[in-house]
Amino acid sequence: MAATRSRELGTGLFIFLGFAALLFLATQTTNVDEYFDQSGYEVSARFSDVAGLKVRAPVTLAGVNIGRVERIEFDNDRLDAVVTMRIDNEFDQIPDDSDAGIVTAGLLGSKFVGIGPGGSESYLENGSEIQITQSAIILEDVIGRYLFNQSPQDGGQQ
Amino acid sequence: MNFLHTALEQLLGRLRKLGAVTLFFGEILVRCPAGLKRPRLVSAQIYASGVLSLVIIMVSGFFVGMVIGLQAYDSLSRLRQEDILGAGVALTLLKELGPVVTALLFAGRAGTSLASEIGLMGATEQLSAMEIMAVDPLQRVVVPRFLGGAIAVPLLAAVFSAIGILGAYFIGVVVMGVDGGEFWSQMQEYVDPEDIWEGVWKSVVFGIAASLIAVYEGYHAPPTAEGVGMATTRTVVTTSIIVLILDYLITAFLL
């Protein structure tokens, strides 16, 4: 009888340990709260090029994380990319003439959206669209332009 | 010509075995609802294949975590990217090593004992005796062992991954001096709930496959000492191959 009891206790402990491990993995290794967080309000912005921007990339204002990229869609009529961002509710005083740009963390790092505050008295709210946008800077283009400017034709005129 | 003939014969043999295992799986599945009505039989098997495998899983998990931590630290420090150590280790363990190594260890520790136990029951005619007493040996012997194994493997895999991450934390943060906050925050940055699901799915599939192969081989072992021995060997060999093939298929499917 004692043997059965300790065996049942062992089985119970094992099942408990297994689920505790799963819980540990689910809460400690990943950001569940943020992932399932549906609070906050949605703001969209149009970019002619979002190269490298990914869903769930951070949205920052003055370097502070204020939200995440919710989805990136392609507009068939205007042939540009519509980026929808979810901004946390506590940041509800962003002027509606703010601009949005796609910024790279470091030289080759991941892309995120940087918001530059405007000066308007009215604020962004759910569903509003940011009008002034700056597309992703593509390093290859910059290098290409630089090389072109240094071409012999240019140099020859001096 | 003769060679072709043998090759064809081998292929047909393999196909026949695949069919036999699938049919056996069907027979077990049909009996599973009734098997769950006797939870004590199942919990005794969870004890036998889960609790008794816990030590080997935890020790292996800790050392696997430590060695990945060490190797990843070495590679990442050449790129000055030690901060993402936590993310790399967690993804490796959750998605691949946790489920796969757990299934392989399970085949060696618990699958062999399942196969030899059932095989020996067959060899000593205990299974036939049950049939004479109108007790269905599949129901009474095979189904609880299958369910016990299939329930134990996902839990063992979770324990393996969790302990492995702690092992990597120990090596990376305590020994090598990676920043502890970066270790966890980079991990949370890069690991998605989907990654955990992928690991859980894999371990569930591997648990079913490993337990099924073990009980199949045991139940169909020739009733001799040699036959039981062969059945245990085949359990480990087949489980290892099947788990690695399934691993590739699931990964390719889910990514």
Image (cartoon, coloured by chain):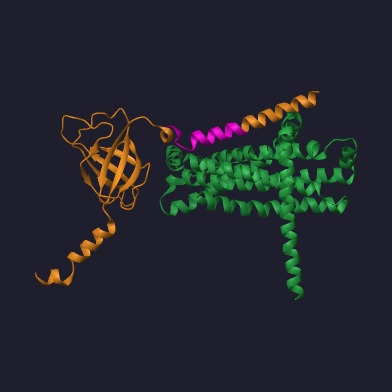
Chain colours: A orange, B green
Quadrant holding the N terminus of chain B:
bottom right
Magenta segment: does it hold B222? no
Locate residue B147, reporting x and y percent: 71, 38
Query: Total marks drawn?
Result: 0
Residue situated furthest front in the rendering: A77
The structure residue drawn at horizontal position 81% and vertical position 23%, both measured from the top left corner, is A1
Locate residue A133, reporting x and y percent: 22, 45
User: Compared to B241, does A91 lie above or below?
Assistant: above
Q: Which residues are magenta?
A: A18-33
Magenta segment: does it hold A28? yes
Task: Decide if residue A112 is in sight here.
Answer: yes
Residue situated furthest left in the rendering: A158
Locate residue B253, reporting x and y percent: 53, 51
User: Compared to A17, does B230 lie above or below?
Assistant: below
The structure residue drawn at horizontal position 20% and vertical position 66%, both measured from the top left corner, is A148
Is B104 positioned to the left or the right of B79 in the image?
right
Residue nearest the observer in this picture, B251 or B139: B139
Locate residue A143, reporting x and y percent: 25, 61
